[in-house]
C-alpha cells in the first residue's frame, strides 16, 4: 500500500534515508536530523513531500519504503514537475512492487496536476536501479552533467554577489 507520509512517519523516513546513504556509500554525508525532516515535510510551508510504502505484518502496517519529492519548474514547458529526491525500498521488501507503486503514484500526481516532467538522478554504478527505471520507459539524460556548489565554494560565491558585472553569467 502507498500512502502520504504523516508526522508519525518521520523516524522511519529518517532511518530509511540513513539506510539509503549507506547503500550509496555516503553515510557520512547523511546529516539531516528527524527534526529537520519534520519541519521540511510538515512545517508551516512544506516544500518537500513524502510517500510511504507499507506491508502488513502481524504487528500491523510496517513502512518498507519511501519516496521524497518536491516540485520543480520547466521554463521550456511552462509547467511544474516532480523531482524525486529519494526512492528507497528496504532490501527485505524489494521485488514486491513497492518501488514501482511509489513511482506510479508520483506519475499519477504529475498527470493529475498537469505536470509534464518527472525527474530524478541515479548513481552511474547502480545498474539494478538503472535497469528498473529503463524498464518503465525512463530515459537517461546523457547530455547533461550535474553541478553542485557546497561548503566553502558556495560561501565564497555568495560573498561575491553583485561585486562585478563581468561575474554575472548569461
Image (cartoon, rainbow, N blue to C red):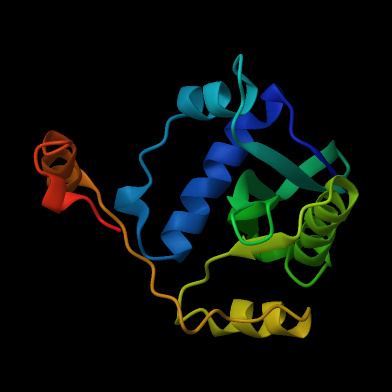
- Where is residue 91? Give x, y as percent: 64, 65
Quarter where residue 101 is shown? bottom right
Q: In the image shown, does 41 or 18 lie closer to the viewer?
A: 41
Q: In the image shown, does 71 or 37 lie closer to the viewer?
A: 71
Q: In the image shown, does 112 or 35 lie closer to the viewer?
A: 112
User: Would you say 169 lies left or right of 87 here?
Assistant: left
User: Would you say 158 lies left or right of 32 here?
Assistant: left
Q: Residue at x 11, y 42 (%)?
A: 156
- Where is residue 24? Give x, y as percent: 43, 65
What is the number of callouts on the image? 0
- Where is residue 108? Give x, y as percent: 87, 54
Q: In the image shown, does 59 or 31 lie closer to the viewer?
A: 31
Quarter where residue 87 is shown? bottom right
Say if 36 sits above or below 51 in the image: above
For the C terminus, the image quarter is bottom left
- Where is residue 115? Give x, y as percent: 77, 53
Q: Residue at x 19, y 44 (%)?
A: 151
Q: Residue at x 81, y 59 (%)?
A: 107
Say if 46 sits above or below 142 in the image: above
Say if 5 sits above or below 103 in the image: above
Say if 25 sits above or below 63 in the image: below
User: In the current view of this chain or complex, which residue is farthest to the top?
Assistant: 44
Q: Residue at x 62, y 61 (%)?
A: 76
Amino acid at each position: 500500500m502507498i500512502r502520504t507520509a504523516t508526522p508519525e512517519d518521520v523516524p522511519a523516513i529518517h532511518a530509511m534515508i540513513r539506510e539509503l546513504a549507506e547503500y550509496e556509500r555516503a553515510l557520512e554525508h547523511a546529516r539531516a536530523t528527524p527534526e529537520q525532516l519534520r519541519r521540511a515535510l510538515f512545517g508551516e510551508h512544506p516544500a518537500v513531500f513524502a510517500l510511504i510504502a507499507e506491508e502488513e505484518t502481524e504487528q500491523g502496517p510496517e513502512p518498507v519504503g519511501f519516496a521524497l519529492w518536491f516540485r520543480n519548474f520547466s521554463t521550456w514547458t511552462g509547467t511544474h514537475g516532480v523531482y524525486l529526491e529519494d526512492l528507497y525500498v528496504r532490501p527485505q521488501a524489494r521485488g514486491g512492487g513497492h518501488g514501482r507503486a511509489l513511482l506510479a503514484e508520483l506519475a499519477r500526481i504529475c498527470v493529475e496536476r498537469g505536470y509534464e516532467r518527472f525527474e530524478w538522478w541515479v548513481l552511474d554504478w547502480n545498474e539494478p536501479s538503472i535497469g528498473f527505471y529503463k524498464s518503465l520507459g525512463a530515459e537517461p539524460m546523457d547530455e547533461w552533467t550535474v553541478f553542485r556548489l557546497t561548503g566553502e565554494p558556495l560561501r565564497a560565491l555568495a560573498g561575491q554577489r553583485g561585486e562585478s558585472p563581468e561575474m554575472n553569467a548569461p
